[in-house]
Amino acid sequence: MDLGIAGKRAVVAASSSGLGFATAKALVNEGCDVVICGRDPHRLVAAANELPGAHAIQADVSTLDGATSFIARAHEHLGGVDILVTNSGGPPRGQARVLGAAELGDAVDLMLQSAVTMCTAVIDEMVDRGWGRIVGVTSKSVREPMSDMVLSNTVRAAVTSYLKTLALEVARSGVTVNTVQPGSHRTSRLLDLVGDNVDAAAAAIPVGHLGDPDDFGAVVAFLCGEHAGFITGAAIAVDGGETGSLQ
């Protein structure tokens, strides 16, 4: 299916590996002009080498300055932003009863502040243009909190609520805002989390296997396409049936 976004200017945060990289790859394959970012320069160069035509910017979007600088530099390179995919790494594990203010603040910076900062930087131009796509990558934990993951559970839920609110505010402008909630995909982060229990993790998923990051990227790319213009404010699980619907 031709998604109708060839030539659109796309910015994908935290995209030197994992689901961010897969998303950037899908948008490159659709003919978008894509800017990626990452903190590790070696990993970033390797990612750019696998994405023909993509422009790489070294940036840490977990900080206000890093997120602001990334969008400004991407805007300067592209001349504008039509598509924004917000994404970030995940916070460390932790339990609710021992959650500290410092840890919570770091997680807010990593996931919520970064998303808000990047959206704020592009939303007005999208509204003025009458077309735009924002997709936030969150987690299945928004739907069903995971044990020992209080920071991810809490802050990703806040990101989802923020983006839903933004979607309602700009719904009549031709700009859509959605979130995708990945489950267990075969990424380096997931493999680090489950360690030697990969087979057990796969068996626990109703479809019986881990997700393919490329399939996840295709879902995000669809939401960025012309055919998805009637989808906004949605929170879409891409998790092999692991969780139920939001109430």
Image (cartoon, rainbow, N blue to C red):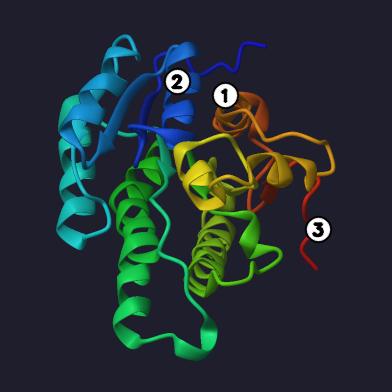
Structural distance between the alpha carbons of marks 1 and 2: 8 Å
Residue for point 40% across, 39% down = 84
Q: Earlier in the sequence, mark 3 or mark 1?
A: 1
On residue 11, the disc is none
- SS for tag 2? helix
- SS for tag 3? loop
> Residue flagged by tag 2: what amino acid is it?
Lys
On residue 214, the disc is 1
Q: Earlier in the sequence, mark 1 or mark 2?
A: 2
Q: Earlier in the sequence, mark 3 or mark 2?
A: 2
- SS for tag 1? helix
Reply above or below: 52 against 102: above
Asked if disc 1 and disc 2 are in contact, CB closer than 8 Å, the reply is: yes
Horizontal and vertical percent position of residue 164: 58, 61
Classify 10 Å Cα crowding around label 2: few (below 14), some (14-19), many (20 and above): many
| The quadrant where residue 167 appears | bottom right
On residue 245, the disc is 3
Labels 3, 1: front one:
1
Classify 10 Å Cα crowding around label 3: few (below 14), some (14-19), many (20 and above): few
> Residue flagged by tag 3: what amino acid is it?
Ser
Taking the image as shown, residue 172 lies to the left or right of residue 40, namely right
Horizontal and vertical percent position of residue 117: 30, 58
Taking the image as shown, residue 161 lies to the left or right of residue 72, namely right
Horizontal and vertical percent position of residue 8: 40, 22
Residue on which disc 2 sits: 25
Q: Which residue is more in the foreground, 198 or 87?
A: 198
Horizontal and vertical percent position of residue 5: 50, 19
